[in-house]
Amino acid sequence: MKNPEVTRILNADRWVLARGELDVGPYLLRFREGLSSVADTSGYTRLLTIVWPYDDEGSGTLPSPSDLAALEQFEDGLCNAFEQDGHAIVTAVLTLDGARQWVVYADDISGCGHRIASMPQNEDPYPIELHARDDPEWTYLRDQILSVVD
């Protein structure tokens, strides 16, 4: 594991669920408890967002039962691929306006890509979009995601 503070949170595996309403419709936000107070984010300085659109943007919808099953299956595989050895940490999952977004922090984004590509797939490739950038202070998570519930 790369970082004792992050490892402690990863091992505790405690999630908080928040529900609410924004201008675009209802949202569901799950995030790992204790992340807003992590002082040392070393070893996890790159932000990877993974977006799975399940409906049109602007629809304001939450997933149907069949969409939800596919999203949950993907998330289980994602957590197993990233977290078994502490390669990356899924910090939050936001479901809003026809899409689900996983907020992941790692140092090796190409390794994350390889792990996603190695995950078992059903008939079609996962309909996901990947975006990566530097975020050593976890500003995206803290200021844009968790600020919804603070």
Image (cartoon, helix red, strand yellow):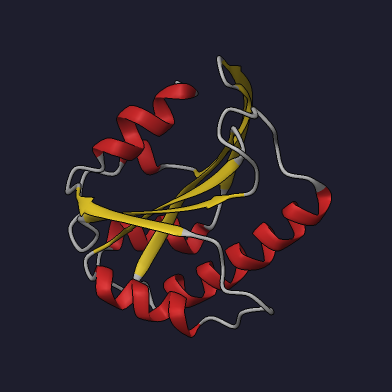
Closer to us: 131 or 72: 131
User: Which part of the image, by quadrant, shows the N terminus?
Assistant: bottom left
Taking the spot 52% from the left edge, 69% from the top edge, the residue there is 78
Spot occupied by residue 69 in the image (x, y as percentages of width and height): 76, 59
Q: Is residue 99 above or below residue 128?
A: above
Task: Where is residue 95? Give x, y as percent.
Answer: 59, 40
Left or right of 113 in this view: 21: right
Report whether residue 8 is seen. yes
Classify residue 27 by image quadrant.
top right
Classify 10 as above or below 26: below
> In this view of the protein, can residue 84 be seen by the observer?
no
Q: Residue sitting at 57 percent across and 73 percent down?
A: 125
Residue 43 vertical position relative to residue 55 in the rendered view, above or below: below
Q: In x, y percent, where is residue 52?
A: 54, 53
In the image, farthest residue toward the right = 65
Screen quadrant of the C terminus: top left
In-front residue for pair 70/137: 70
Quarter of the image for residue 113 reads: bottom left
Residue in the picture at 69% in, 32% down: 61
Residue shown at 51% from the left, 58% from the top: 12
- Toward the front, the furthest residue is 56
Count of numbered badges drawn on the protein = 0
Name the residue nearer the viewer: 107 or 38: 107
- Compared with residue 85, is residue 59 higher up or lower down, i.e. above or below? above
* Left or right: 46 in relation to 18: left
Q: Residue 126: x percent and y percent?
A: 56, 68
